[in-house]
């Protein structure tokens, strides 16, 4: 019998299925600046969306922190106990000075934001099934598995969101992970290694972290990219393989890990995709999901430059402008007539879009 959780309480119908909390952002004494990650990017995305009048504070779903009981659905008690050691958290987040802070400070200033983003991903999983789509403005900690963190990922939010759906939502028994962050998503791959209910597609720079050969065995559709891959080749591959993956298996939910560290100039990603290329990529994935009436949950994952937040906001605005996400659609489920028309209109240009 699943434990009682606040994360699955119904969100107000008037809200967009966009999940966020000001608690997502990591700020303390400038230490967060020691990692190339923009640790306030999530709040900046929301501010851009507010400036564009797409959303307001009372129209988004407030993320709640995942409790220990929630986390234990996937994580081992031993792993959660390890996070009570500051040096372990310093290693996972790649911010060495964290090792010298008292753990109560680390819990409050580093792990609570990550637990809140994790709660947000779990909440967005249910919202996606209820409304046809959902976006967690944070999350996407794809290097963390049940018993091991790394690469700035302390909790396995993708695994958790899928396991929660399998355990609690009738009719959800197959999931597809489309991982388009620049890095291999070795955390969820290790967690779902022998689970035939989960189909994993992963597109990543073959030469960078984590290079986890064992985890690669879990990938059903593996697309390894060269250094400096650019828009045309990238979009063509994404389009071909997203279509292929969804034709091979029609899941009950898509978890889309939409990392923006593929952006040209990212210090860790090593790819060369333009801001427009990222916006097009998200469009390709949402069109593929919506045309098949498959609920889609998007998480924002990696992205290590200051301009990342603007690109994520622009992509969400583009999805809205195209009718791929909107309030009506969200409140009336995936088979919305407005979307049906949009899909018919867009079938013709989807191929052109990838080849431009």
Image (tube, rainbow, N blue to C red):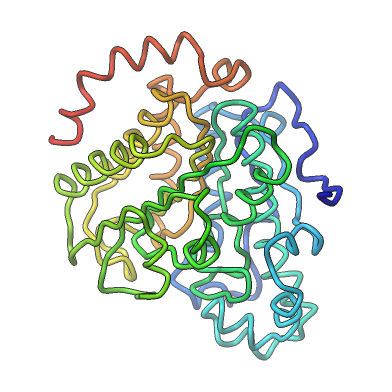
Can you say whether 9 is above or below 64 in the image?
above
Location of residue 27 with respect to 164 vertically, above or below: below
Residue 349 falls left or right of residue 344: left
User: Is residue 165 or residue 286 the one in the foreground?
Assistant: 165
How many dots with numbers? 0
Q: In this view, does 186 lie above or below 105?
A: above
**Which residue is rendered at x = 57% and y = 35% of the image?**
134
User: Does residue 114 appear left or right of residue 241 in this picture?
Assistant: right
Residue in view at x 65 percent, y 45 percent: 166
Q: 298 or 167, which is in the foreground?
A: 167
- Measured from the top left, where is residue 95 in percent x and y? 54, 81
* x 51%, y 13%: residue: 336
Location of residue 183 (image quadrant):
bottom left
332, 87: nearer the viewer: 332
Q: Position of residue 297 (x, y in %)?
A: 53, 40
Residue 232 position, x and y percent, is: 14, 44
Specify the quadrant that holds the C terminus: top left
Quarter-wise, where is residue 87 in the image? bottom right
Residue 239: x and y, percent?
25, 39
Residue that sits furthest to the right in the current view: 4
Q: Quadrant of residue 132?
A: top right
Q: Which residue is drawn at 41% across and 59% down?
A: 303
89 on left or right of 347: right
């Amino acid at each position: 019998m699943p434990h009682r959780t606040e994360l699955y309480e119904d969100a107000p119908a008037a809200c967009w299925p966009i999940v966020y909390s000001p608690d997502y952002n990591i700020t303390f004494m400038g230490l967060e600046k020691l990692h190339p990650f923009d640790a306030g990017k999530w709040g900046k995305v929301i501010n851009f969306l507010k400036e564009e009048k797409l959303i307001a504070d009372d129209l988004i779903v407030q993320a709640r922190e995942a409790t220990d009981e929630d986390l234990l659905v996937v994580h081992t008690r031993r792993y959660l106990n390890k996070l009570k050691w500051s040096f372990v958290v310093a290693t996972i987040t790649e911010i060495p000075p964290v090792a010298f802070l008292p753990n109560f400070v680390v819990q409050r200033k580093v792990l609570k934001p990550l637990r809140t983003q994790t709660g947000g991903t779990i909440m967005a999983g249910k919202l996606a099934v209820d409304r046809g789509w959902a976006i967690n403005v944070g999350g996407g900690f794809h290097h963390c598995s049940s018993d091991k963190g790394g690469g700035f990922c302390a909790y396995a939010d993708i695994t958790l969101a899928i396991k929660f759906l399998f355990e609690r939502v009738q009719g959800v028994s197959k999931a597809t992970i489309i991982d388009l962050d620049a890095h291999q998503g070795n955390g969820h791959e290790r967690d779902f290694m022998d689970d035939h209910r989960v189909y994993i597609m992963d597109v990543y720079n073959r030469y960078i972290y984590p290079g986890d050969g064992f985890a690669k065995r879990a990938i059903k559709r593996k697309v390894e990219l060269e250094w400096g891959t650019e828009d045309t080749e990238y979009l063509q591959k994404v389009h071909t393989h997203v279509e292929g993956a969804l034709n091979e298996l029609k899941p009950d939910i898509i978890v889309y890990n939409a990392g923006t560290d593929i952006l040209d100039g990212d210090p860790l990603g090593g790819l060369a995709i333009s801001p427009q290329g990222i916006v097009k990529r998200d469009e390709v994935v949402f069109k593929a999901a919506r045309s098949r009436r498959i609920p889609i949950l998007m998480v924002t994952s990696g992205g290590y430059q200051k301009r990342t937040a603007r690109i994520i906001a622009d992509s969400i605005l583009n999805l809205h402008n195209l009718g791929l996400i909107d309030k009506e659609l969200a409140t009336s489920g995936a088979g919305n007539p407005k979307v049906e028309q949009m899909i018919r209109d867009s079938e013709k240009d989807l191929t052109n879009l990838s080849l431009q």
